Image (cartoon, grey):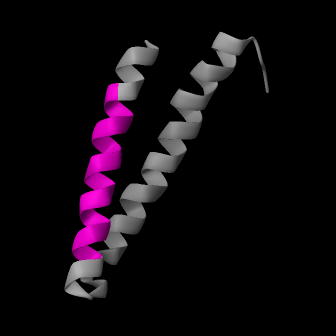
Amino acid sequence: MAGHLYVILEVDHSKIKDLLEKTIIRKSAKEFPQSKKELEVHKEDEERYFYSELKKDDGVTT
């Protein structure tokens, strides 16, 4: 399961990086709302799925 999560996070990181680069290169706030939304969703997913799996592997519970 953890291996699959790494792939998902890697793709997500790339997508967010591209959105932020477009925002910076164009010096336009046009893409910012989408970048912000994607980053918030990514953060929530990362905390919910990735970190919870790591904690399970380490025997840590919250």
Write the residue at 20% across / 84% down.
26
* Location of residue 48 by image quarter: top right
Q: Give x and y (percent) for residue 18.
A: 24, 60
* Location of residue 20 by image quarter: bottom left
Write the residue at 51% across / 48% down.
43
Write the residue at 26% across / 64% down.
19
Write the residue at 22% across / 72% down.
22
Tell me, yes or no, whether the highlighted magenta stretch contains residue 46.
no
Tell me, yes or no, whether the highlighted magenta stretch contains residue 16.
yes
**Along the horizontal axis of the image, is 17 left or right of 37?**
left
Q: Is residue 30 depicted above or below 56 in this figure?
A: below
Tell me the quadrant of the picture where the N terminus can be found. Answer: top left
The mark total stands at 0
Q: Give x and y (percent) for residue 32.
A: 34, 76
Q: Is residue 40 depicted above or below 56 in this figure?
A: below
* Magenta: main secondary structure: helix
Closest to the observer: 34 or 50? 50
Q: Is residue 31 depicted above or below 45 in this figure?
A: below
Tell me the quadrant of the picture where the C terminus can be found. Answer: top right
Q: Give x and y (percent) for residue 4.
A: 35, 19
Look at the image and give the residue range highlighted in magenta.
7-23
